Every structure is written in structure tokens, then in C-alpha cells.
Image (cartoon, rainbow, N blue to C red):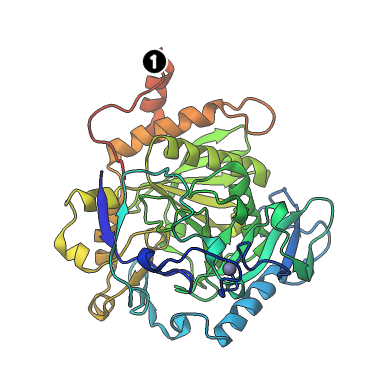
Amino acid sequence: MLRIKRVPTVVSNYQKDEAEEVAPRAGCGRNCLNECCYEGAKIPLYAFKKLNKISKGLCCEYENTAPPFAFLDSLLLGEWEDRMQRGLFRYDVTACETKVIPGKYGFIAQLNEGRHLKKRPTEFRVDKVLQPFDGNKFNFTKVGQEEILFRFEANENGNTLLIPNAPLDVENSPSMVAINVSPIEYGHVLLIPRIFERLPQRIDRESFLLALHMAAEAGNTYFRLGYNSLGAFATINHLHFQAYYLAVPFPIEKAPTKKTISLNDEVIVSELLKYPVRGLVFEGENTLQALSNAVSDACICLQENNIPYNVLIADCGQRIFLLPQCYAEKQALGEVSAELLDTQVNPAVWEISGHMVLKRKKDYDEASEENAWRLLVEVSLSEERFQEVCALIFEVLDTVDVEGSPSVAKEHSDACLEEVEARNNASQPLQVTGTWECLV
Ligand SMILES: [Zn+2]
């Protein structure tokens, strides 16, 4: 069993060390989301109109009508600022120093000394991407109701609407948007799909589509969602996405790509080039649903093969970066240099995308593109392993019914051609060979 020690990020004011955890009882006094406290609870409900069509060049399409106004943006930020006024955050993120590091990519460095304070290191098992939900550990049903901003759901038959004082409606699997009390940027929130179903941290099609809808609904290219699997620096095994606003492009968004396959003319899959972390980029040509299915099936494939990964949802849900990684595994095996470990930087989705959250003044002062690159290179799979993983993913995508009819990989770049040929020629499904497995 591989484990690493790290200081867990405190995402809720009710997240205590395990030992301090008390069993919930009637009227537990925390105003939480469990049976003890949810009687009569009211939480705003944001029900979005299900727009499936992707319109290039425009973030979200409101079928001949302008969006009501930046509806989700204003609700989210208004509620978020209200929680800031109420002092619910552990520190003032707007006071954290941030700079764009000179260089070709424009890595962003933030000095965030408050994030890891007042918490002792905890052991995390990092060699299992799928772990069962454990109700005794911290999960989002234990947050205070004041940390919840609103419910976020599709309005199956109608237009976007907001009901300010909607009942909590535990029976109907509400999805929630909550603050992260350790924000790394303005408007940092968590999206918790079907919170009362107590789902472990694992991607499924329905939840991923909800995250894409949130990105599309926000309609703001500076608002991105991210996902960390277990073994890739998620610390809470309760299904959640993170999201925040950052008003500059992420370096990963500027990296060149090479088109690898096209799925039924619905989704283009490209390989990320000239970036320290190897990854795939998924772009929708037609519908959010097709894009969502392709990415979620790729994620499910990684999960089932026990390969840790991170996901960045950019461009209002139209472009998605999928990054398998192996940093925590290397860390557990003692293969990461002391110099890198000393920085205590956990390369999760934001760092991989180029937003480096630094904990020491020294690292902030000395931040350079070279240093960011050096860390991220350690996060990436090797070229050989990455191509093996791509082959696993493409195997799954080839057989996936993207939109009602069988999809066929139509185009292959040179990079993946060999794998594809090997697969086509093999009578057996392609297996990952060798002893080097990224198990974290
Ligand atoms: Zn309670």
C-alpha cells in the first residue's frame, strides 16, 4: 500500500481532524445538511435551461435571446462575497500576492501561506483511484448550511430560473454549490453532484455533464472547473468539482495541440504538445452531451485501470483537458527530490494547468517558468506510458456510442498511429505491459 503524508486542505469549517469527529445527533448545533438539522432548511435553487448545442465562438447560446444577464455569475459571486463578509473563509484570498511569471507560457504564481496552516499532516492512501465512500470521514453533508451557496440543477422543461427560498428537498438528489473555505482565487467554489447520494470521488456521465453545464451556464472563459481523482491530490472522497475565476489564460490553454482522433465528427481529441505534463484535449463540435460522454468514458477508463488523473474544464465547457499523472506515486516511492518536496506544492489540477499555489515566500520570490516546469515534468507520465494510456482510452472511445450510432476513429496522428495499428492487428485487446504501472 502506498501512502503519502500531506497537510490536507480544509475546505469546510466543519472539517475537523478525524479524532475530533463527533457522531451527528439530533440538532447537532452545526446547522449541517444531515437529518439532525435539515428540517425546514431553505437554500436558493438555480435551475438552468438545458442547452445542449455548442456554438463556436460564443460561450453560451440563448437561442436568439440574450442571456437574462450574467445570471449564474452574479448569483455565485454575490453569494460568495456575502460569505466573505460573514467571515466564513479561513483567510482573505484577495490579499494573497499573485503574479504572472515572465516567460513564454505565463505561469501564474500565488503566495498562499494561509492554506496549510493549523493542520497537521495526514496520511493519504495514494495507490487506489477508486475507494468506497466512508460516512465516518468528513464529507459534504457535514458542512454548515451557511457554506452552501445554492442548488444547481437542470430545469428539464423550462427556462433558467432562480427560487431564492427553495426547500432543501433531500429526496430529489439535489446538487449543491458550496464555498471552499480555503479559496485559491476569487469565487472558489465546490460543485457537489447529488450530495445526499454520498458518491465517492469518481467520475460518472451524469455528474460530468452537470459540471459541463455549469461551465456553459457561467458563460465566462475565466471561470473554469477542475477535478482531481484520488491519487491525484483529491483529499475528500466525496464526489466534487472545484471552480473559480482567474482573469488570465492558464498556460495549459495556450499550449499547442495535435489532432489525434475525431469521434463521429462530434468530438475532436488532440494531444497536448510542448507542455511539461502530457495530456489529451477534448473539444466538442456539436453537443455538450457528446463531449461529456467522451470525456467521462475516458475518465472511467482511467479509474478502472487505477490511473490517477486531473481534469480541467475550460472555454465555457467546450474544451477539456485530461491529464493522467503519477506524482503522488513517485512521492510515495521516494522518487521525488527533496528540493521539490520541500516546497510542499501539491500538483493538483490548478498547478498542472499553470496556476502555481506556493506556500513559501522564498518559492514565490524565486518563481520562474523553469521552476514551474521542473515540478510539472515530475507530474507527467513518461512518453511511453502516456502512449499506453492513450491506447487504453482510444480503445474505449472507439466502442463508445457517442450519439446514437457507433463512432469510428477517423483520423490518427503519427504519434498514435503505431498504437492504433498495433491494436487493429492484435487479436486480443491491448494490454498495458511491463512492470511500470502508475498506481497512485
Ligand atoms: Zn446537524
Q: Point out residue 212 in the picture as x, y percentages from the top left corner.
A: 61, 53
Image quarter where ligand 1 lies: bottom right
Q: Is residue 12 left or right of residue 159?
A: left
Instruction: Name above or below for residue 348 compared with residue 42.
Output: above
Q: Residue furthest front?
A: 26
In the image, what residue type sits under mark 1? Ala
Left or right, 224 with respect to 386, comes to right
Neighbourhood count class around disc 1 (C-alpha, 10 Å): few under 14, some 14–19, many 20 upward: few
The N terminus: image quadrant: top left
Q: Position of residue 93 (x, y in %)?
A: 45, 81
Residue 142 pos. (x, y %): 53, 65
User: 320 and 151: which one is in front?
Assistant: 151
Residue at the spot 58% in from the left edge and 64% down from the top edge: 221
Of residues 357 and 151, the one nearer the viewer is 151
Q: Is residue 107 visible?
A: no
Q: Label 1: which residue? A: 426
Q: Residue extending furthest top?
A: 427
Q: Using the rendered image of the protein, determine whether residue 142 is visible from the camera's viewpoint.
A: yes
Q: Secondary structure at mark 1?
A: loop
